Image: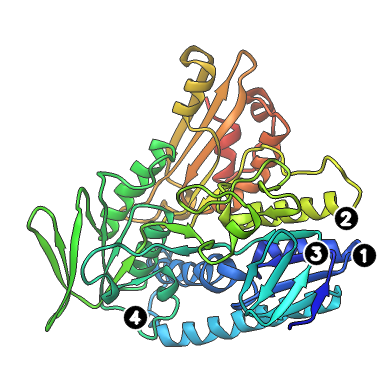
Amino acid sequence: MATVRSFDLVVIGGGSGGIACANRAANYGARVALVADGPLGGTCVNAGCVPKKIFWNAASLSSGQALAASHGHTGTPLQFHWEILKSRRDAYIQRLNGRYAEGLARNGVTLFRGHGRLEGAQRVTVDKDRVLAAPHILLATGGIPLWPEIPGASHGTVSDGFFALEQQPRRVAVVGAGYIAVELAGVLHSLGSDTTLVMRRNHFLDGFETMLREHLMDAMVRQGINLLAGRHVLQLERREDGLCLHFSDGEYLGGLDTVLWAIGRTPRTGDLGLESAGVEADSSGFVAVDRFQNTSAEGIHAVGDITRAPALTPVAIAAGRRLADRLFGGQEERHLDAQPVPTVIFSHPPIATVGMTESEAQERYGPDSVRSYSTCFTPLLRVLDADPERTAMKLVTAGPDEKVVGLHAIGDGVEEILQGFTVAIRMGATKKDFDDTLAIHPTSAEELVTLR
């Protein structure tokens, strides 16, 4: 019979939320165990934010050569080598994995390698041969990419597989309409792949401000990305000349080296033993939590992508740390409060958005109480281009004092602009506050404080 080891907190999952909670709790003096069956850092570090941003940077540098030419730079263009970038990226990710392990050890967190599973309300088994007990257990196992249930789906790959590609696809189709789909399509095209984005609807980024998706669709078409809208994929077939996507209307897209499924993600809760502990989950596998990250079972908590919270690394980290503050730091009311969540889509060009869309604001406050301010301009970086890519911005305000409830932008540098404006919006800034703020000239950011 396995020996039971006792802790104050057992965390199942080695991603951003789980590690953040474990380290914070240990800093309060709690005895903490963390169970991880994959590389430390979870999706963000290994197959998400970090490697994606490295590829996005490379793609931006590649497309930036045309900008350099418009500014008088001449000579032989640089050649991109996928293999070199992948090797250097992998080495960097491995260093990050090591830093996470070092951080856990430095904080006194006991790391168990293996698959963690609930066995009742206060116990966790690790690979069935080790047993951990604690009055508090945190579920932070994250999500995994969805695969389509169609014939031949396994001939393609998902976003995790994208980061494992050893060679750059010559001709590739990305199937999906969310932010992962548009990001990967933009990266692949900018690095030189013949890229097609296949969507079931007539648009992508459903739920985002309409101005953003329309501007991005126009930009992608102008860049040369093939957008196939209103396509329902029936089958993926391997032929002598490559992969072939078959659509419900009888059309097909063949000669593909790679097909990337980017159709969404699902919570990784299938083998967590939720039933044994009385933890409720919905039909899609998401764990239900209250504002304090409590599940339906006493002493069991959940953060990150296995809940219905926004699937963003900073959200998981903040929720994990606040949970530790509450459980072990004496802050009884500490929780992740409702607030505008800033989001960046690393498309080409990038998108930055926080708060409500115009339609959401009208629904909440009423059409007569909402006013928006928009602009579309050529940033100084692009003015020497023969066919410049433009930047678009929009402020959404509500009420008689025109409180800013939404900010949406697409174009060069908006991903860095957003953070400071999010602070202002969280503090309740009004349109007048924006108007009374001195502009920094010449920048794109100044447009947001000079809108009329």
Q: Amino acid at mark 4?
A: Gln
Q: Is residue 259 visible?
A: yes
| Residue displayed at 29% across by 45% down | 203
C-beta proximity under 8 Å, tags 4 and 3 = no
* Residue identifier under label 4: 168
Q: Quickly name the residue at label 3.
A: 134
Quarter of the image containing the N terminus?
bottom right
> What amino acid does circle 3 point to?
Ala
> Nearer the N terminus, badge 2 or badge 1?
1
Q: Residues within 10 Å of mark 2 (few under 14, many from 20)?
A: some
- Above or below, 240 against 154 in this view is below
Query: Mark 1 and mark 2 in contact (Cβ < 8 Å)?
Result: yes
Decide: marks 1, 3 in contact (CB < 8 A)?
no
Q: Secondary structure at mark 3?
A: loop
Residue 269 is labelled as: none
Residue occupying image coordinates x 38% and y 36%: 210
Please provide percent x and percent y for residue 238: 17, 78
Q: Nearer the viewer, mark 4 or mark 1?
A: 1
Q: Residue at x 46, y 87 (%)?
A: 84
Element class at badge 1: loop
Q: Which label's residue is closer to the chain start, 4 or 2?
A: 4
From the image, tell me which residue sits under label 1.
29
Residue receiving disc 2? 328
